[in-house]
Each structure stands twice: as C-alpha cells, then as structure tokens.
Image (spheres, rainbow, N blue to C red):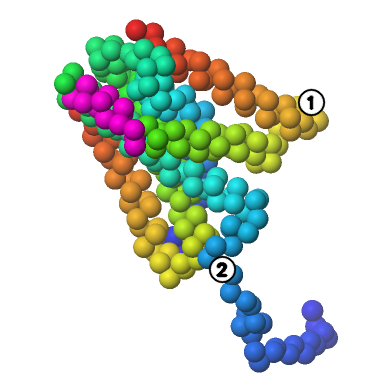
Amino acid sequence: MSGVRQTVRYTEYHPRWYRTRVSTWWWLSRWPYLKFILREISSVFVAWFVVVLLLQIRALSRGPQAYAAFEHWLQIPVIVLLNLTAMFFVTFHAVTWFNLTPRAMVVRFGGKRVPDGLIVGTNYAAWAAVSVVLAWFLLRS
Amino acid sequence: MAKQSNEPILWALFSAGGVFAAFAIPVHLFLLGLAFPLGWIPAPGYEYLHGLFSSPLPRIYLFALCFLALFHWAHRFRYTLYDGLQIKHLNEVIFVCCYGGAIFGTVLAGYLLWNFH
C-alpha cells in the first residue's frame, strides 16, 4: 500500500449528463422487449384471477342465489373476453416461467449438471399432473 | 434503507407466487372463466362447491393461492411501472399502492375464507 501514489483526476462534467433520454415506449421497438413487457403484464391477469376467485368465494358463502348471480356474471361477454385475455397471459406466464427455471435453478445429479431440457420437461409434466389433479377435485361432483 | 432490506423477502414471495400461479392458475381460470360459463364442461353444482370450500385443506390452499399470487403481482407490476414508464419520482407511491393492494387482497381472502359458512 505504501509508496504508491495515485493522482486521480476527475472530470468536471459528469458523463451522466450526456446520456440521451430513452423513450417511454422503448419496449415497442423490438420483439424481445415487447415479450418482456407482455410477460410482466401477465401479473395483472394473475391478480385479476384472484379477484374472480374472491368473488366466487364470497358468492358461495352468501348462498345459492348469490352463487347463481355470480355464475350469470361470468357469462357476460365482456367478462368472458377478459377471461379469455387472462387465459392467454396466464399461460404465457406459465410457459415463460417454466422455460426460465433451468437458468434460475441449476440442478446437479451424480456430479453432473442436469440438462436444461430435462428440467423444463419435468416442469411441464408436473404442470400437467397438477392441472389434472385440480380439475379432478373441481369436477368430481 | 428499510426498502432495501425488504427486497429479498419480497423477491421470495414474488418467486413463490410465480411458481404457484404457473402451476395452478391456468387450469382454474380455464374451468371457472371459460369452460363452465360457455358450457363446454358441465359446471359443478352449488352444493358440491360449497362443501369443497368448507373443508379446511381447500381453504388453506385457496388462501395460499391468493396471498402468493397477489404478492407475485405486486412485485412484478411494481417493476413494470418502474421500467416501462420511467416514472422514478413516483417510486414510493407505486411501492405503497402495489404492496398495499396485495396486503388488502390477502386480508380480504383471509376474512372471506375464515368466515366462510
């Protein structure tokens, strides 16, 4: 440490000042950017589903008449359209989420890294299994 | 900064909610939002659903789903607004609105499921 002398010279004008402003609509310029924003927007439809679920729980708790009204509400074209849009985004979320898991979680087995494809494949298989089990619970009646 | 130290737990909730939402929400939404209202699959009757939602395990499951999905939304939507719209001066407002919304929804879910009858 001793004996080393550094002469540091700072520029008087901060480089930050020369940055150009990025447009608010930067994410429209390229498909990967748009895909990123669409993936982020999927969260809004995740929240929308929770709203529908809470309405269902409330209606079920209030009685058969309230539940019939809730079922009727679900048949309104605007709500069906909204749910169709939500279905697209929620599926988009699931697919992008599963495809990213090998990046987020490195699994090793017997000293070797498990191939990405296998992790993704396992996720899709688990997705199918979970969906079947949940559907079975809801359709058993 | 308190906000900084909360980040890992908020990210963990986001991540857990992302997994939960990816596995569970598509099938739920498909049945409840499309297949039943459009008559593709006969909808389960009131009595059956009421019975199902009355048992403790499904209620715990529904609460976890609401709680984690909402915190997933809060985290992701917060960053969408930060990055997408570049409104840095509103960061605190966005933070409070997103997590406030998630907490409100979670409390509401807890209230509705706890008092379910």
Span of residues in magenta? A66-79
Say which residue appears at 52% left-offset and 41% top-offset: B15
Q: Position of residue B95 (x, y in %)?
A: 40, 58
| Real-space Cα separation, disc 1 to disc 2, in angstroms | 49 Å
Q: Determine the chain carrying the residue at label 2.
A: A
Magenta span includes A116: no
- Write down the residue under mark 1: A110
Left or right of residue A12: residue B6? left
Judged from the image, the secondary structure of the residue bearing numbered disc 2 is loop
Label 1 sits on what residue type? Gly
Report which quarter residue A33 is drawn in: bottom right
Q: Determine the chain carrying the residue at label 1.
A: A
Q: Is residue B33 above or below residue A9?
A: above
Camera-side residue: B102 or B34? B34
Camera-side residue: A6 or B9? B9
Q: Position of residue B40 (x, y in %)?
A: 42, 16
Q: Are marks 1 and 2 on the same chain?
A: yes
Tell us which disc is closer to us: 1 or 2. Answer: 2
Q: Earlier in the sequence, mark 1 or mark 2?
A: 2
Left or right of residue A46: residue A103? right
- Write down the residue under mark 2: A23
Magenta span includes A74: yes
Q: Position of residue A10 (x, y in %)?
A: 70, 88
What secondary structure do most residues of the magenta stretch adopt? helix
Q: Residues within 10 Å of mark 2 (few under 14, many from 20)?
A: few
Left or right of residue A108: residue A65? left
Label 2 sits on what residue type? Ser
How many numbered badges does the structure rendering display? 2
Report which quarter residue A27 is drawn in: bottom right
